[in-house]
Amino acid sequence: MAFAYADGVLCAEQVPLEEIARRHGTPCYVYSRDAIERAYREFTDHFASRPALVCYSVKANSSLAILQLLARLGAGFDIVSGGELARVLAAGGAASKVVFSGIGKSEAEIRGALTAGVRSINLESEAEMVRVNRIAGELGVRAPVAFRVNPDVDAKTHPHISTGLKQNKFGVAHTEAERLYLEAARLPHLNVCGIGFHIGSLMTDSAPFVAATRRVLALAERLERAGIALAHFDLGGGMGIAYREGERCAPIAAFVHGALDALGSRKETILIDPGRAIVGNAGVLLTRIEYLKRGESRSFAIVDAAMNDLIRPALYDAWHEIRPVREAQSGVPAGVYDVVGPVCESADFLARERPLAVREGDLLAVMSAGAYGMVMSSNYNARPRPAEVLVAGGKATLVRARETVDQLFAGERLLP
Ligand code: LLP
């Protein structure tokens, strides 16, 4: 277990979170190296029997140290911006293992990706296909491309993170795909190399994922008959994790083997782009209680982390487990608290109605905060963003210093 109690104190691997708070302050994201590596290896182990590349979805957590860990293990990367490409390269990742997704790639981003030599640009519209062909021609290269097909399959997840339905803005329509592939194959500066899909994030059931695989496979077979051979099949990401103890969530094996069974004996290289499943349960947000406040109808634990540090509860009504860093101590009265931050918004909560026996000054760990935590943080209310610490065994390393207030307005200018 990456995060477990030892002698009554919650630890990250072998390091007590109290020690990290003392050394680096709060709020602070803490990651377990072992948990990240194990989750990554779970994917590669399941694919061991055939050519495959696990492309970690950088958007889930793009801290350089985490990208570096994964690059060293041989991971590929799924990116959605020039900024993410720069991060991957700075962390030692190989451009030849990068797939570039996203519906709004700019000219500069396409140019940068082709110059770096990415493995595939995942096209999401006809207009983008035309643009990539033109830029590749200007650069004198052939752009490796795949279409992201929208299979119109319901991922049965939160509407904000569902992407595979007709009404979503992502991918090219399933009904349009064949025509676009034939068109792309005729364009002189494109090298049609693959096909892919991604129907949504936080899927707790593998059935929609397997259904989408079947649907896109049928399309690939039609393309093959039309003379278009594909080198890779990209399954996207979206495998869920359990945020609550006992929560039912299909294991990685169900997703991977469900897709592999559907694909049968086909020879394409399989790409898969998990983000959350690799880092989600490998991180916590460590925070300290500033005040306990009894309202008329509710009690509040006001902590030093807020919605600007972790926006998932405010944005998706997401549930994160809250654990006291020191296990319940005798003499501390138990209460039911909303865990809230200092930001001036009623949406600024990290958890609601949680039974806790805590005092002012106590530390809390917001669990399962490794994915879509730090990457979605902001400076709202002029709050510097948290520090990040990576733990490996008994060693805790500061991998991102806490932001300072000076850094917040370093690029601003007063009027003359
Ligand atoms: N591939 C594509 C094309 C994607 O759009 C995404 C996520 C992934 C892979 C990785 O999905 P994952 O394996 O992490 O589920 N902020 C939200 C999640 C947004 C996901 C966006 N796309 C959250 O906090 O739940």
Image (tube, rainbow, N blue to C red):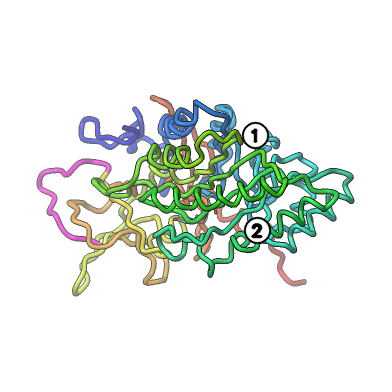
User: Which numbered mark, 1 or 2, is in the foreground of this view?
Assistant: 2
* Residue pictured at 79% horizontal, 48% vertical: 190
- Residue 11 image-quadrant placement: top left
The relative height of residue 97 versus residue 140 in the rendered view (above or below) is: above
Q: Position of residue 144 (x, y in %)?
A: 74, 44
Q: Is residue 242 left or right of residue 92?
A: left
Binning the other alpha carbons within 10 Å of mark 1 as few (below 14), some (14 to 19) or many (20 upward) gives: many
Q: What residue type is labelled 2?
A: Ala
User: Can you tell me whether the CB of the residue at mark 2 lies under 8 Å from the nearest atom of ligand 1?
Assistant: no
Give residue 352's position: percent from left, percent from top.
Answer: 27, 62
Residue 14 found in image quarter: top left
Mark 1 and mark 2: span between their CA atoms? 31 Å
Quadrant for the N terminus, please.
Answer: top left
Whether residue 185 sits left or right of residue 322 in the image: it is right
Label 1 sits on a secondary structure element that is loop
Residue 379 screen position, x and y as percent: 53, 60
- Please give the name of the residue rendered at 26% of the width and 64% of the height, measured from the top-left corner: 300
Q: Is 258 part of what is drawn in magenta?
A: no
Q: Position of residue 258 (x, y in %)?
A: 42, 41
**What stretch of residues is rendered in magenta?**
325-337
- Please state which of residues 211 and 135 is positioned toward the viewer in this rendering: 211
Q: Name the residue under label 1.
A: 93
Q: What residue type is labelled 1?
A: Gly
- In this rendering, is residue 286 above or below 355? above
Q: Quadrant of the C terminus?
A: bottom right
Q: What numbered label is drawn on residue 177?
A: 2
Say whether residue 331 is magenta: yes
Question: What kind of element bears circle 2?
Answer: helix
In the image, is 358 to the left or to the right of 398? left
